[in-house]
Image (spheres, rainbow, N blue to C red):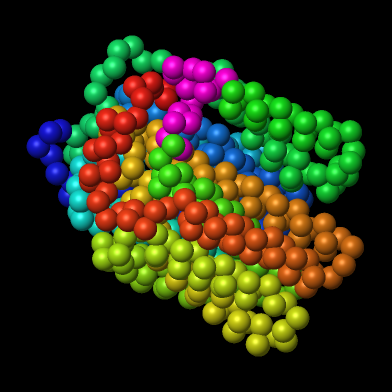
């Protein structure tokens, strides 16, 4: 392990692994009508199925990252890919809601394993500019994968059937496993017997489930109904309990001392908020199909500008990071993304004009995320202590998953609530305004928390972080 240096084969295997996540996460957003028609499930059930993957990923990703540090990052990556195959097979053989829900839960657990473990492998086997290059390709798989799978998912669903999306997911998972099989195991230095914070995980899970159910079903139940009020109380109380209990533990699910590092905290908070903008994709794709009569393929074609832009700009973001540091590309990336999202809310525009505006909006969306991706990921990784890279990456990616789950749930709820009493045009506009707010908050978090010199001396800050962080273990 000490003499091993990361290879392009390892990078490719990790990218394939990350793309499996987007095949089952992003592609589902584009095929809502097709899945509804084929399985005969309600929109509410399908909305739950879409958000479950991100929810379960968010609940378990920190735990998986901490476990990867302890028992091996390659082992946990392999576990994630195996779970991806099982979850995809559930959806391939689904005939109704049961296997759909089960498969989505398993896919969430898969993502929880794959995301932090692969980032930790990048940190372990690449240094300096080579690490930033490797993280750029990881970002191409992650942020770029969302665009690839959005476009590909629509095309596959239209011309082959939506279940073929998950057949391709199985193939990519198998390719990923083959490509990383020769990589040595990577883990933190031994610190005694393995322990895990089970009570913290239970409290955290209760918090996230109560929050997600409240957001998703609040409109149907009535926001002031007894059940909604109970869910809101459970969410707040359990969140407070979790924070207070975890701060006192030597072995905690989330080591809150990580957030004392302002660059790491700024990258993580902005990452949460920019991923919450994923709700735009649900609203925009549903609106153009329901309100404008687009097919799933045509809907996917609208986002091809996103795909091209994000893939083109990720390496550009890496170069800007190396020239001027992380803060500037993170701010400009978040700003451009927010402008692109805002353009999609102009639903009062006539047919062709709106189509052009949405296409440009998607392109700006991808342009901004491409610039933001590598500087943000590198800021989080380079400021993590070496013995907690998996955990820190888990928290960073938990922000992605929970941001996406909460953003999708809020956007879908706003869209369906407004559509029930008004026009789908108004519903889409208001749903997208919510996402613009997320974008503005993301920009503010970067401006106030990420210092100007972030990313310029990442190796030095990484070494300092090892000495400054307390010795307690996260899992």
Q: Quadrant of residue 290?
A: bottom right
Q: Which residues are magenta?
A: 245-259
408 left or right, relative to 363: right
Q: Quadrant of residue 316?
A: bottom left
**Residue 46 visible, this orientation:** no
The x and y percentages for residue 346 are 69, 77
The x and y percentages for residue 408 are 65, 53
Q: Quadrant of the N terminus?
A: top left
212 left or right, relative to 274: right
The x and y percentages for residue 320 are 31, 67
| The magenta stretch spans residue 33 | no
Looking at this view, is 260 or 333 the one in front?
Answer: 260
Looking at this view, is 300 or 379 the one in front?
Answer: 379
Q: Residue at x 57, y 48 (%)?
A: 403
The x and y percentages for residue 198 are 52, 18
| The magenta stretch spans residue 254 | yes
**Residue 427 visible, this orientation:** yes
Q: Is residue 114 above or below residue 241?
A: below
Q: Residue at x 9, y 37 (%)?
A: 3
Q: Residue at x 20, y 51 (%)?
A: 128
């Amino acid at each position: 392990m000490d003499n091993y240096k990361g290879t392009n084969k390892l990078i490719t295997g990790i990218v394939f692994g990350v793309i499996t996540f987007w095949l089952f996460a992003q592609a589902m957003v584009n095929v809502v009508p097709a899945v509804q028609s084929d399985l005969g499930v309600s929109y509410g059930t399908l909305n739950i199925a879409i958000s479950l993957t991100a929810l379960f990923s968010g609940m378990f990703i920190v735990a998986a990252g901490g476990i990867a540090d302890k028992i091996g990052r390659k082992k946990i990556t392999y576990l994630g890919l195996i779970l991806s195959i099982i979850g995809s097979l559930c959806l391939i053989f689904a005939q109704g809601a049961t296997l759909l829900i089960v498969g989505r839960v398993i896919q969430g657990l898969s993502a929880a394993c794959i995301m932090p473990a692969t980032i930790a492998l990048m940190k372990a086997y690449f240094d300096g500019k080579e690490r930033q290059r490797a993280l750029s390709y990881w970002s191409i798989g992650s942020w770029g994968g969302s665009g690839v799978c959005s476009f590909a998912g629509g095309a596959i669903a239209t011309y082959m059937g939506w279940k073929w999306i998950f057949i391709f997911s199985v193939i990519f998972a198998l390719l990923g496993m083959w490509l990383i099989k020769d990589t040595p195991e990577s883990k933190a230095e031994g610190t005694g017997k393995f322990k895990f914070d089970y009570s913290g995980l239970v409290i955290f899970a209760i918090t996230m489930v109560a929050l997600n159910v409240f957001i998703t079903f609040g409109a149907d139940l009535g926001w002031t109904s007894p059940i909604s009020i109970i869910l809101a109380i459970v969410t707040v109380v359990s969140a407070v309990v979790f924070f207070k209990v975890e701060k006192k533990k030597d072995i905690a699910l989330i080591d809150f001392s990580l957030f004392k590092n302002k660059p790491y905290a700024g990258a993580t908070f902005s990452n949460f908020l920019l991923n919450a903008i994923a709700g735009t994709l649900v609203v925009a794709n549903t609106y153009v199909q329901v309100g404008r009569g687009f097919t799933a393929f045509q809907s996917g074609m609208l986002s091809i500008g996103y795909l091209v832009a994000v893939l083109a700009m990720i390496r550009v973001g890496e170069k800007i990071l190396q020239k001027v540091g992380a803060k500037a590309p993170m701010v400009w990336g978040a700003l451009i993304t927010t402008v692109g999202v805002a353009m999609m809310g102009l639903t009062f525009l006539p047919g062709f004009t709106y189509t052009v505006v949405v296409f440009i909006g998607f392109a700006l969306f991808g342009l901004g995320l491409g610039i933001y991706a590598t500087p943000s990921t590198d800021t989080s990784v380079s400021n993590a202590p070496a013995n907690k890279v998996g955990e820190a990456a888990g928290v960073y990616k938990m922000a992605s998953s929970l941001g996406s789950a909460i953003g999708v749930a809020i956007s879908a709820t706003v869209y369906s609530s407004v559509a029930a009493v008004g026009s789908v045009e108004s519903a889409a506009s208001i749903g997208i305004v919510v996402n613009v707010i997320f974008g503005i908050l993301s920009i503010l978090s970067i401006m106030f928390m990420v210092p100007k010199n972030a990313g310029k001396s990442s190796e030095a800050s990484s070494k300092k972080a090892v000495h400054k962080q307390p010795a307690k273990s996260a899992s």
